[in-house]
Image (spheres, rainbow, N blue to C red):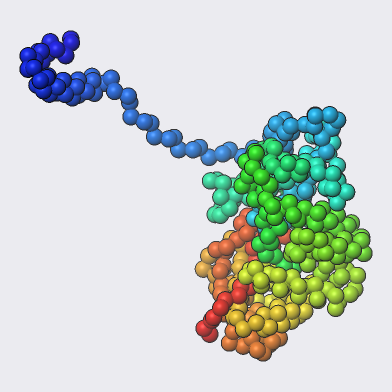
Amino acid sequence: MPIERLFGRSANPDGKATRNRYAMAGALAGALVALIGCTEPPAQTAATPQPVVPVPFDQAVLSAANAVFSTAPAAGTGRQLVVIDPLVDGVTGEQSAATRAIGERIVALARERYPQFDVQRFSPQTVSRSPYVMVGTFTPVNAQGQTSGERAGYRFCLVMADLRSGKTVAKGVARAQMQGVDATPTAFFRDSPAWTEDAQVKSYISTCQASRVGDPISPVYLNGILAASMVSEATAAYTTGRWREALDLYTSARATQGGDQLRVFNGLYLTNLKLNRPAEAAAAFGDAVQYGLANNRLGVKFLFRPGSTALSPGAPYDMWLQQIAGRAAQGSACLQVGGHTSATGAPALNERLSQLRAEYIMGRLETAAPPMRGRVIAHGAGAQATLVGTGADDLTDALDRRVEFKVIPACRT
């Protein structure tokens, strides 16, 4: 029915009453429309995202790799050169049997199904040709995809980046089941004594995990890619027992931009140790300690006997302690010694055991460097800060049982 029929027409010459009646009519019409349900329905709340279901390891690898190769633009003419910067764990930065297997599967897939891409070895020679570079992370996560709590699968990220344009050109992600994954660290990472949140490795991880297609590559990663290619070749030489060649490559990597990194210091330490050069090995370990303390986080693999504060044999712990104590004593700051355990066992027991181990290392440091007396604090973290978190209690999660050193400006004893 027309609104005029409801309210009538006004004969008021100035139209004021008419305007009032039309205003009332508009308000009533709006109310009637709302009552009979003609208004737009309220916005629906977003559905709660469903947990990602992990798939078998091989299926996850193929899923992520196919997503990358099928969407990455190929060269206009000829084949597009691709190199793979070896994949790592997205928290520790370590390489494992699983990450190595992923790299091998990617190469095989490219040769079988994607002839437009020419996958070659990651080396200074191939990097100088501005290829596509593939990076990836393979990280144990919980059911919500976070690196905490009980691990329920592996989060797999794979990215292709164009060194010529400096941008990400393709990305694939997948979730793999825990079963069938060999997370044993490769020889170099198994033997490396020290760990910290290295800037070069963090830039590699962020290039994969924090980037979208079209995003620029991390400048830290780009500036250090030549060093990374040398480190990759050095690590391969170390794995096959070519100690002298590995030492030369680590030495060359240190002299390049981005060569000031923990992998290089660990490599110099390990190769000098293998070549029976104890003084050079001690100096390299000292450089690793200095680098970690400068980053205010240095984890060292002081491996203890199960349930004990006695150190397991096999590593030059006395030299390690001398270097840590000596480097820490050079400054005036204090040092927190944190004991860590894996997630296996009762939390209260783990915290107590980690405290006792931290106190043991504290005592050894104060003996090695008397000026450190009164400047060291022991703290037992138990399993509150695991890096791997699988609770395997073997070589795969050795970093969870580390002793960690942090510089603090002041302390109380």
In the image, residue 53 above or below residue 267? above
In the image, residue 19 above or below residue 163? above
In the image, residue 195 above or below residue 171? below
Q: Position of residue 315 (x, y in %)?
A: 78, 73
Q: Residue at x 57, y 63 (%)?
A: 385
- State the residue in front, 367 or 266: 266
Q: Residue at x 67, y 90 (%)?
A: 370
Q: Indicate left or right for 172 with 81 as reference.
A: left
In the rendered image, the quadrant that contains the N terminus is top left
Instruction: Answer with the quarter of the image where residue 32 lies.
Output: top left
The residue lying furthest to the left in this view is 12
Q: Residue at x 66, y 71 (%)?
A: 294
Q: Position of residue 392 (x, y in %)?
A: 66, 57
Instruction: Answer with the quarter of the image where residue 316 lies.
Output: bottom right
Q: Indicate left or right for 72 with 342 as reference.
A: right
- State the residue in front, 306 or 107: 107
Q: How many numbered discs, if any?
A: 0
Q: Indicate left or right for 147 with 93 as reference.
A: left
Q: Residue at x 83, y 73 (%)?
A: 281
